[in-house]
Each structure stands twice: as structure tokens, then as C-alpha cells.
Amino acid sequence: MTTRERLNAVFSFKEPDRLPVIEWASWWDTTIDCWRKEGLPATVKTSQDIAEYFDLDIHRQFWMPTLKASCPKPGYHGASLLDQQNHNGYEKLKPHIFPDGGMGPYKDAIMFWENRQRMDGIPIWLTLEGFFWFPRKIMGIESHLYNFYDEPDLMHRINNDMLAYNMSLLEGFCELCMPDFMTIAEDMSYNNGPMISKDLFDEFMAPYYRPLVKKIKDYGIKLLIDTDGAISQLVPWYEELGVTGFLPLERQSGVDVSALRKKHPGLMMLGGFDKTVMHLGEAAMRYEFERLLPVIKQKGFIPSCDHQTPPQVSLRDYKLYVTLLKEYCSI
């Protein structure tokens, strides 16, 4: 079977010859810098290069941009792009967001990988930014949370514009290449659960998810929500909208894939391996894989690092991790 066939089989709760051996997240630059000092060749540069170096299965993610090159840069991580937290501030920013031109700037790359999808069985993954992620990106982390109450009309306006943009991106991409799965970037949870209430989700996010999810389902594309942190409260919110997939399943935030599988038998899951044990040796890593093994055997789950590999994981550590990942993906 090809990687594409394996991925589609797993997410369809069928039996592949083995699981895909993939890393869903690219590697931290600081981690790569450490590995270079330990012998990672300078010629290994791109994510595909790194995956091939470690003999991982190849996939290709397209994360579609929401900001133009002219967009002002935030003063610090999490700062606002708006000079005013109101409609006037949004009007000033609008010429610098939602890049136009359709798939034109990305057509050659999409067509190259569409050919590899067909010829080599490499899965294609499309990422769109969601209705929590994007308002936060332009409003700033703190202002965004206040604006659910202080500027509700603006929140709706932004998400209505975001819906139109996402629908356009989805249609344009699918004209060139049908992705094997999609993620919507949200990061709307932290260690103790969601950052907003179910009432706010229903008012400000669900109305925009419904038409987008319907369109994705009409295409027959598998959809997962990308949100870090504790997700147990969020899963049923999204299930009400027809979304039945999540990543990265962060263990540090108490995510238990076995408990999720028990409560949500049809949930597609990707990730789940505790990144904090990757530098602790074979026994610790094997123990972590054994924790995941019952769910691995139940299908619908692809084990992978539960976020980017931290820099304390040596090149030797990571090679051992990949060896064990291959072993458990073949059980």
C-alpha cells in the first residue's frame, strides 16, 4: 500500500498493511540547529528532506495564508495588528489581509504535489485558519478574548469574511487537487480546557463552521481540528457540527487517547505521543507507545509526536524514536 492508501484506510477505520509513519508537525529550528551539531547534514533542509533522512513516510501540507506581504508585523508575539479594536481598525487592516489571486501563486507547487499524490501515493493535506485562530491573529491574544463581549459585531464581521475567504480557498484548491485530509487551525484550548465557553462557541464560531464543514463533507474530505491543550470538552462541541477528528492530542495537557476513544468511538486522531519522554531513553519511549497501543489497534488513530520535537531530544534519541514508531506502526 502507499502512504496515501494507508492514511485513508486508517481514517476510514479500515485495516492497512501498516500505519503511516509520519510527523504531522515540522521540527523546531532550535531542534534542527542542535541536530546539525550532532551530524545532521547541511544538505538536509526542507521538511521533506528531514522526513526522507529519517526514513519517515512523506506527506505534503499546504497551509493557506491569510495575510498579504504588506500586512504590518505585530510588535511582539500575540500583539494586535489593529490600531483600534473596532470596525475602523478592521477597515484599515482589510487591504492587507485575505490575499487575492486565488491559487495562482501556489498553482505550480500544488500541481507538482498533485502529480506525486497520483503517481507516488503521497497524501496531500490542506490547512485553513479557523474562526478562533484568525480573529485572535489580527486582534491580538488578550484583545481577542475581550472582544467576544466588547466588539461582538466586529467578531461576527471578521468571521463572516473569513468564511467567504475559506470557501474560496477550498473551492480553488479542490479544482487543482483533492486533499486526502484537512485541518482547521484553532488552538482554542490550553492545559485546563477551552479558552471560551460553549455559549460563545455556539454564537461566534458554530454559524461559520456549519457551511464550511458541509462543503468539506460534500467534497468527501476528512477533517480534523488542530487545537493544542485539553480537548475533552471541545470534542462534543465539534461533533455537533459534524467534525470527528482532532490533533495533536497533547499528553502534557492530560489528553488520554483511550478515554477519548471510549467516549467517541468514531473520532479520527493524529498525534498523542508524549514529546516530554523522547529524550529519556528506550524504556520510557516504549512505555509511552504501550500506552497508545490499545488505540492503535482500534484503527482511526495515527500515532505521532504530540507537538514539535523539543531541542533536548538528541539526534540519536530521535532516530531511536523513529525506530520504535515504525515498530508500533507495524503491529
Image (spheres, grey):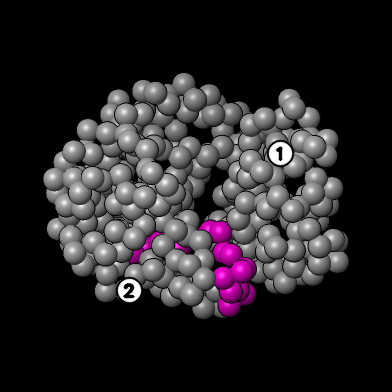
Q: Amino acid at mark 2?
A: Ser
Q: Are marks 1 and 2 in contact (CB under 8 Å)?
A: no
Near mark 1 (Cα within 10 A), the count class, few <14, some 14-19 or many ≥20, is few
Q: Is residue 313 above or below residue 104?
A: below
Mark 1 to mark 2: distance in Å?
A: 40 Å
- Residue in view at x 21 percent, y 67 percent: 149
Q: Is residue 314 left or right of residue 232?
A: right
Q: Is residue 214 above or below residue 189?
A: above
Label drawn at residue 13: none
In which image quadrant can residue 13 be found?
bottom right
- Residue in view at x 14 percent, y 58 percent: 153
Q: Which residues are magenta?
A: 240-259
Q: Is residue 319 visible?
A: no
Q: Is residue 283 left or right of residue 322?
A: right
**Front in this rendered view, residue 72 or 295:** 72
Q: Amino acid at mark 1?
A: Asp
Q: Position of residue 176 (x, y in %)?
A: 41, 29
Check the picture and name the quadrant holding the C terminus: bottom right
**Front in this rendered view, residue 302 or 87:** 87
Near mark 2 (Cα within 10 A), the count class, few <14, some 14-19 or many ≥20, is few
Q: Is residue 129 visible?
A: yes
**Front in this rendered view, residue 297 or 80:** 80
Element marked by disc 2: loop
Q: Is residue 51 above or below residue 15?
A: above
Residue where numbered disc 1 is placed = 33
Residue where numbered disc 2 is placed = 197
- Label 1 vs 2, first from the N-terminus: 1
Q: Position of residue 184 (x, y in %)?
A: 42, 51
